[in-house]
Image (cartoon, helix red, strand yellow):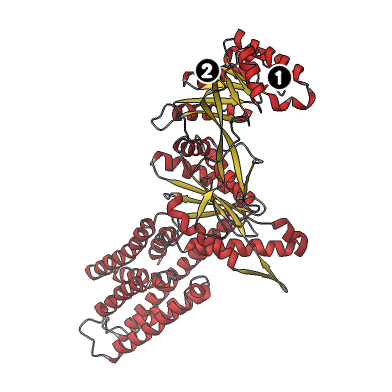
Amino acid sequence: MLISIFFISGFIRYYQSLYQYAFSDHSHPTYPIGARALLMIMSLGTAFILHFMGYMVHNDALMFHNIGLFLLVFPLLDAAINKLELLIRLAGAVSVWFMHHNMHFDRPQFVISLVLLAFGVILMRKYPRQIRDNIWASLALFAYIAVIFWALLPPYAEHPQDAIWITVQAVTMFLGMAWAASLLWIRQYTEDANNARMKQLANYDQLTNAKTYSLYQHDVTHMFNEARENNQPLTLVSLDIDHFKQINDHYGHLAGNAILISVASKLGDVLSKYGRNHQIYRTGGEEFNVVFYGQTPADIRPIIVECWDTIRKNKFTYQDFDVTITISLGVTAMRTTDHSIDDTYKRADDNLYLSKHAGRDTITIEGETMHNDAQHELVATYTFFTQAIMHVTDLDHTNRHRSELLLRMYDHEHDRWVLPELFDISVETQIDLMRKALANSPTRRLAINLTNAQFIDQSVALALTQFCNSEDGPDELTVEITDVPDMVTTRNITAIYRAGGIRIDIDDVGSDNSFELVQHLLPYVDGVKFAMQNLRHNNDEAMLQERIRFWADVAQEHGLTFILEGVENAAEVTFAHDTLGIDLFQGYYFDKPQLPSL
C-alpha cells in the first residue's frame, strides 16, 4: 500500500503539471495538442505495462493490477478532454475490464460490472470537477469503482474467504491511492488557483479584464524583438472611446466603468473569432492597444473594421440609459527603421490622433483615414501642398527652381484643408507624402519644413538621406528650419544631412530668427530665407528694403543662397533682382500653395 501511494503521488504530480500545460491558453497551437497526447500515452501506457507485470508475478500481482486500474480510471475525470480523448480512455479501461473477466463473459457478474461501470463513468463525466475537487466525493467514487471491479471478478482464489480478504485489501489499497491522489490534486489545484489569481491581479485590469499596461510593455517589447529577429510582421493598433469624459460627466463614473467593461468585452469577442494571436491591453483610462503578431495592416483591416463597426452598432445600457459609443483607431506596422517598440507605438498614437481630428468614429491606417460616410474608403488625412520657389533672370524669364512642400490636414467636418495642429508627423509619413508629391510635381527639387524635434533627431536625418539617395527620391532635397538648435547640436546633425547630400536653409531670418541668434550657425547651413510677410505690418517700404539688403549681404558674405519670400508684386521683384542681385523668389506674385493634382 505504501509503495502504491508513493507511486501514485509521483504520477499525479507529473500528470497534473502536464495537464495544466495541455489545457492552458498557448499562442502556439501545436504545444497543447502534443501535451494532451502525452497525457493519454502516459496514463494508458503505464497502466497496461503494470497490468502485464501483474500477470507475470504472483506475490505483488494485486499491487500492479490495482495501480494500473487507478491509472485508467483517474484520467476519466479530466473535464477538458474532447469526445475522442474520452473514447480512447474508456476503451483502455474497458479492455482491462475484459482482460480480467477473460473466458467468463457468460457470468451475470460481468454484465452487472459493465453496467455499474457505465453508471460510474456517467457520474464522472457529469460532475468531474465536483468529484475531483472534493476529497469525500473522490473517495466515494473510487470506493465504488474498486468494489464493482474486485468484488465481481471471476474466482481468483481457492477459498471464498481468501477472495473476500483479497477484495478488502484491494479496495483498501485503492482508497489509499485515491486519498493520496485527491489530496495532492486539491492542494496543487488550490495553489495554482492562488497563483493564477495573483497573476490576474498583477497582469489584468480588474475593471475590464484586459491586460494591464505593465504587461503590455513586457509583452509588446518581447513580440517586437521576436518579430524583428524572425523577420515577421507586427501590427499595432491604438484605440480609445470617443467623448468618454462627457459620458462620465453626464451619466457618472459608474456608467463609465460599465461602458469600459462592455467595450472591452465586445472587442474581446470579435478578436477571439480570429484566433489567439491577438492580445488586447488597457493602456490608459479609455485607451486600449491591440497587438497582431505575424500580420500586416492589410491582413488585420477586416478585423479592426469589425471591431469598430461592432462598437458603433451596439447600444450600451446602464440602468435606464442607452448610450451610443464610438471608437477611434490608429494602425501602424513595425518598420525596419524602428529601433524599439516606442517608435512603432508613436506612429500608432499619431494615427489615432489623426482619427480624432478627422471627426472621431473612424480608423486611420498609416496616415490614411477612413471616411464615416464611406466606411471602407480610405482618403488622405495629411498631404503636402506645393508652392514654387522661382529662379528669376528678368520679369519675362522665370522658371521653377524648386517646390516647397507645405503640410496640410483635411478637416472632414468642414470639408477643407487646414494647417494642422500637429506638425511632428513621423518621418515615414513624410516620405510617403513626398513620394506622392513627386509623382505629380513639375520639378524633382523639393524643400520641406522640419520642426526642431524632427531636425535634431538622427533617425529622421538618416531616413531622409536614405530616401534622398534612393531611386524614387528627389533630385535635390532642402530642409528648412525655423527653430534653430544650439551650436553643438547643429554641428553634429548638419554633418549627417550634408553627408547625405541634403541642403539646409534657415527660414524666417530677420523676423523669427535674428542675426545674433543665427550668426554662429551660418557656416553649417546652405541658405537663408527672408519672409517679407512677417515684417510688412511693422516696417515701411524703406525699412523693409534695408532689412532685405542686410540679409542679402550676409548670405553673399557666407556664400549662402538667399530666397526672398512673400513677394506680392512685380516692383518688389524688380528692386530685389536689379538692385540687390537676388534671383530666388517665393510668394503670391508667382503662385499660392496648392494641392497637387492627384
Assess disc 2: are there few (<14), some (14-19) or many (≥20) residues with their C-alpha within 10 Å of its C-alpha: some
Position of residue 148 relative to residue 279, above or below, is below
Judge from the rendering whether residue 348 lies leftward or rightward of residue 109; answer left or right: right
Disc nearest the viewer among 2 and 1: 1
Q: Could one spot residue 505 in this view of the protein? A: yes
Please state the horizontal and vertical placement of residue 313, each as a whole percent of the image: 58, 67
Q: Of the numbered discs in the image, which one, if any, rests on residue 495?
A: 2
Q: Residue furthest front?
A: 396
Q: Is residue 358 left or right of residue 397?
A: right
The answer to whether residue 530 is seen in the rendering is no
Secondary structure at badge 1 equals loop
Label 2, label 1: how far apart the Cα atoms are: 25 Å
Residue under circle 1?
A: 510
Looking at the image, the residue that sits furthest to the top is 557
Which picture quadrant has residue 124?
bottom left
Residue 7 numbered tag: none
The residue at 57%/48% (across/down) is: 215
> Going by the picture, which residue comes out furthest to the bottom?
108
Seen at 38% across and 30% down, the residue is 471
Q: Residue at x 70, y 15 (%)?
A: 515
283 relative to 89, above or below: above
The correct choice, above or below, for 199 with respect to 405 in the image is below
Q: Quadrant of residue 533?
A: top right
The disc labelled 2 sits on which kind of residue?
A: Ala
